[in-house]
Each structure stands twice: as structure tokens, then as C-alpha cells.
């Protein structure tokens, strides 16, 4: 192996070890654990210090500089966009929500890329440390064909991703489905779970499947589209054109837009005992637990509930679990149902974490 390649490999192993250890590490520790010559360790540490990837921690030890690199996630939704920057430890460095009704026009994407530049400036995020920008859309994306197949809530069908990449070409960009990104973020926080199903409760309902430590995307990149599971045969019309889909019953719009309320208003009315609101919630919960019971029967693994609704569900989890227990075939208790870590930030965090994850493997 050429010397420069060997040095890069050693440096990567040193960085990965410091990253994983989560505490200060000395050069002696590194030489011993990684079976490296002291010279190789010193060279690697000097290079990492110079690049601002580690910090002296006193006593001849070194620790991770969490902001050695950063990544940004952008979620595009029907009425708004959200931007989130994270560091190497998935800690939030900045977040902004902007009301920006979606339109598949050059003007919209130009404004969005301007918002990105302002966001980077306002939060003092150095562009030379920015690994990339992940963008999520509430739709089915075929990465092999580089095409957005459909995003019913944005009224988009068959759009080549090139049309979107073009507007962000200043940075490395990755475009993906929002629920897949949220699932990735959740998986990042729960590396001990090798199997997991993620259900995102947003205006659109999506999901992601992680099987034996890997994301299962399906033969056509369309796995986990749980929003379009039929839960009421010949039921309500869904955005996708079919009837009875979970999304037609458990979109968060059922608890907000459709009632002319915000989610805050809905859940405070529920807490205050408003009977009409309680009846709407019970119907919502009934459909949700039908879907969860089906997922559990199909996948037999932990299920994580996430998205914009998840922060509101904390106090309601026991009743959801009780109802779910009545509907599942094998489970008396419901240890398998959890709420996510990132809530409405899941998609942003997940798509940004893709860059962090790739960087850790290839730096
Ligand atoms: Zn549907």
C-alpha cells in the first residue's frame, strides 16, 4: 500500500476510534488499541488537529471536535420548509421553519436555495465544513432511475431529480423520501435495534423498514409506504386516488387543518375534556391502532411512531398501547411501541445524518 494511502487509512481509524469512544483518548491508547506505530499515531493526530477534527483535551489526550464537519437537512412540505444543521454528534446547531407554499417552479427552488445561504450565514456555519445538504420530499423516490415517482401532497408526478439537484449544485446534495430519512435518524439513535419499523405521522403518512441493520427499500424503492395501506375497504378517498388508505384517516390534517385548528389547539381541547374533540381523537386512534396491529403482525419487530404528531403522543401512549394490545394477535403487553427522538425534526436530521454516516466511513 502506498504510504499516503496508508497514512489516510491510519488517520481514518484514529478518527473513528476517537468518535466511537466518546471520551478523551491518549496517543498511547491509540497505538495499543489500533496496533499502530507511535509515529503513525502522531502523524494521524497532527493531521486531524490541523483539519480541526479533534481537540486537545489536556493530559496529552484528544477528543472529538463535534463541529469538525456539519451537515444540513431541508424538508420540503406543502406549506413550509424546515432547515436544520447538525454536527458530527447529531446535535442541533440551528433550525428554522419558513412558510413557503410549494410550487414546482424555478422561482420556488431559487428562493429555497437563497434561504439556505441565509441560514448558513445566520448560524455561522462554515461552508468549508459543510459535508452536504439533504433534501426530503413527501413522495416516492426511485433513486435508481433518479426520479420522483409521485408526491401527491405536492401534486407532483414523474419528476427527474436532476431538475431539483440543479438548484443546489453548489453543495453535495442528496434528495430522498422524508419518512426514509426520519427512519434513518431513529435508527442512528437506536443502533442496538437490528429490526425496526418506523411510521411517520405527518400530513402525509410514510414509513421505513430496517431489517438486520439495513434499510429495506424494496425492489422499486417503494417499501414502507404505509400511508397507502387500505384500512377501510371502499372508505374515504385518498390523495393517491384510491379509497380507504391509512393516510385518509390518520393524516395529521384530520386533527388540525380539517377542523380549522392547530395541533396545539386540538390537544389542549382534548386535555380539557372537549367531547367532540375526544370523539375525533378516538376515531383517529382506532384507525391508527388498526394499522399498528397490522404492522406488528407483518414485521414482528419494534415500531417507532414519529413525525410532527409524536411530541403530542407522549401522554397518550398508554391508551394507544392498551388499544393496540386488544388488536394484536400475539402481544399482551406493548413493549414494542416507542415514540421517536427527533419528532418534527426527524426528516431533516436523518437526511443530514446520511452525510455524517458516509463521512465516518470514508474520511
Ligand atoms: Zn392512498
Image: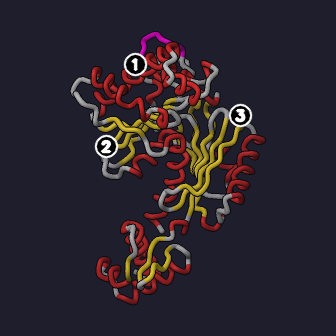
Residue highlighted by disc 2: 195
Location of residue 75 in the rendering, given as x and y in whole percent from the top left corner:
60, 43
Q: Nearer the viewer, residue 232 or 317?
A: 317
Residue highlighted by disc 3: 101
Q: Picture quarter containing residue 111?
A: top right
Q: Find residue 206 and name its label.
A: none
Say if 44 sits above or below 242 in the image.
below
Location of residue 117 in the rendering, given as x and y in whole percent from the top left corner:
72, 55
The structure residue drawn at horizontal position 52% and vertical position 17%, both measured from the top left corner, is 274
Q: CA distance from mark 3 to mark 2?
A: 36 Å
Residue 63 located within the stretch drawn in magenta = no
Main secondary structure type of the part rendered in magenta: loop
In the displayed image of the protein, which residue is found farthest to the top? 234
Residue highlighted by disc 1: 286
Look at the numbered disc 2 and give the secondary structure of its residue.
loop
Which residue range is magenta in the image? 231-237
State which mark lies toward you, 3 or 1: 1
Residue 236 located within the stretch drawn in magenta = yes
Amino acid at each position: 500500500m502506498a504510504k499516503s494511502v496508508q497514512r489516510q487509512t491510519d488517520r481514518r481509524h484514529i478518527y473513528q476510534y476517537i468518535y466511537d469512544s466518546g471520551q478523551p483518548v491518549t496517543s498511547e491508547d491509540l497505538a495499543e488499541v489500533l496496533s499502530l506505530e507511535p509515529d503513525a499515531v502522531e502523524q494521524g493526530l497532527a493531521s486531524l488537529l490541523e483539519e480541526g477534527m479533534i481537540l486537545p483535551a489536556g493530559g496529552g489526550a484528544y477528543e472529538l471536535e463535534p463541529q469538525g464537519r456539519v451537515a444540513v437537512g431541508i424538508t420540503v412540505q406543502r406549506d413550509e420548509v424546515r432547515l436544520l444543521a447538525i454536527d458530527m454528534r447529531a446535535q442541533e446547531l440551528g433550525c428554522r421553519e419558513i412558510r413557503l407554499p410549494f410550487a414546482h417552479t424555478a422561482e420556488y427552488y431559487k428562493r429555497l436555495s437563497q434561504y439556505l445561504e441565509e441560514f448558513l450565514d445566520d448560524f455561522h456555519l462554515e461552508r468549508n465544513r459543510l459535508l452536504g445538504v439533504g433534501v426530503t420530499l413527501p413522495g416516492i423516490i426511485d433513486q435508481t432511475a433518479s426520479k420522483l415517482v409521485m408526491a401527491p401532497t405536492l401534486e407532483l408526478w414523474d419528476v427527474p431529480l436532476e431538475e431539483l439537484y440543479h438548484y443546489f449544485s453548489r453543495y453535495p446534495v442528496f434528495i430522498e423520501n422524508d419518512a426514509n430519512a426520519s427512519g434513518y435518524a431513529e435508527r442512528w439513535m437506536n443502533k442496538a435495534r437490528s429490526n425496526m419499523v418506523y411510521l411517520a405521522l405527518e400530513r402525509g403518512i410514510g414509513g421505513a423498514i430496517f431489517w438486520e441493520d439495513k434499510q429495506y427499500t424494496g425492489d422499486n424503492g417503494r417499501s414502507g409506504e404505509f400511508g397507502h395501506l387500505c384500512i377501510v375497504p371502499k372508505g374515504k378517498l385518498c390523495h393517491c386516488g384510491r379509497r380507504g388508505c391509512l393516510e385518509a384517516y390518520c393524516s395529521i390534517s384530520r386533527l388540525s387543518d380539517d377542523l380549522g385548528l392547530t395541533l396545539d389547539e386540538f390537544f389542549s381541547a382534548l386535555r380539557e375534556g372537549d367531547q367532540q374533540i375526544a370523539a375525533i381523537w378516538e376515531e383517529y386512534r382506532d384507525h391508527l391502532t388498526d394499522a399498528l396491529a397490522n404492522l406488528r403482525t407483518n414485521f414482528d419487530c419494534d415500531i417507532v411512531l414519529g413525525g410532527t404528531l409524536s411530541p403530542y403522543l407522549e401522554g397518550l401512549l398508554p391508551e394507544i398501547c392498551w388499544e393496540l394490545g386488544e388488536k394484536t394477535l400475539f402481544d399482551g403487553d406493548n413493549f414494542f411501541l416507542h415514540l421517536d427522538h427527533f419528532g418534527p425534526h426527524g426528516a431533516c436530521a436523518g437526511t443530514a445524518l446520511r452525510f455524517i454516516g458516509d463521512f465516518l466511513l470514508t474520511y
